[in-house]
Image: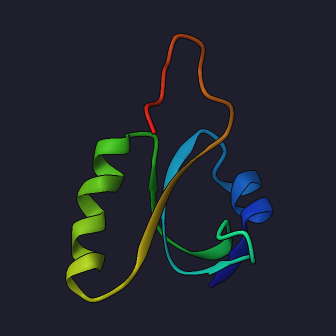
């Protein structure tokens, strides 16, 4: 089921989410999609990403919520 980024943020706060069938705005930012997997562990989400990529889906991973203190993300 398609959800907006705002809906996903409310429902999956503090989780990594794996999304497919994403919609982008004109600035190439993802504004919504279908959440197919979520977990507090980034590694679990990334490992599930392989299945969807092998099936030909374009996938997107995002952390939803406030980044915990002491955690650094490298983009």
Q: x and y percent of residue 12 in the render?
A: 63, 52
Q: Is residue 44 above or below residue 53?
A: above
Q: Residue at x 65, y 70 (%)?
A: 28
**Quarter residue 74 falls in:** top left
Question: Can you name the residue that lies furthest to the top here?
Answer: 70
Q: Is residue 36 above or below residue 43?
A: below
Q: Residue at x 69, y 61 (%)?
A: 8
Q: x and y percent of residue 35 in the render?
A: 54, 71
Q: Residue at x 72, y 69 (%)?
A: 27
Left or right side of 35 for 30: right
Q: Is residue 44 above or below residue 30?
A: above
Q: x and y percent of residue 47 in the render?
A: 23, 56
Q: Residue at x 23, y 74 (%)?
A: 51
**Quarter residue 7 falls in:** bottom right
Left or right side of 61 for 26: right
Left or right side of 38 for 8: right
């Amino acid at each position: 089921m398609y959800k907006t980024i705002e809906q996903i943020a409310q429902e999956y706060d503090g989780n990594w989410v794996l999304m497919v069938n994403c919609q982008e705005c004109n600035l190439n930012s993802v504004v919504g999609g279908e959440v197919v997997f979520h977990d507090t562990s980034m590694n679990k989400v990334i490992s599930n990403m392989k299945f969807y990529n092998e099936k030909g889906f374009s996938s997107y991973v995002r952390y939803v919520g406030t980044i915990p203190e002491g955690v650094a993300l490298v983009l």
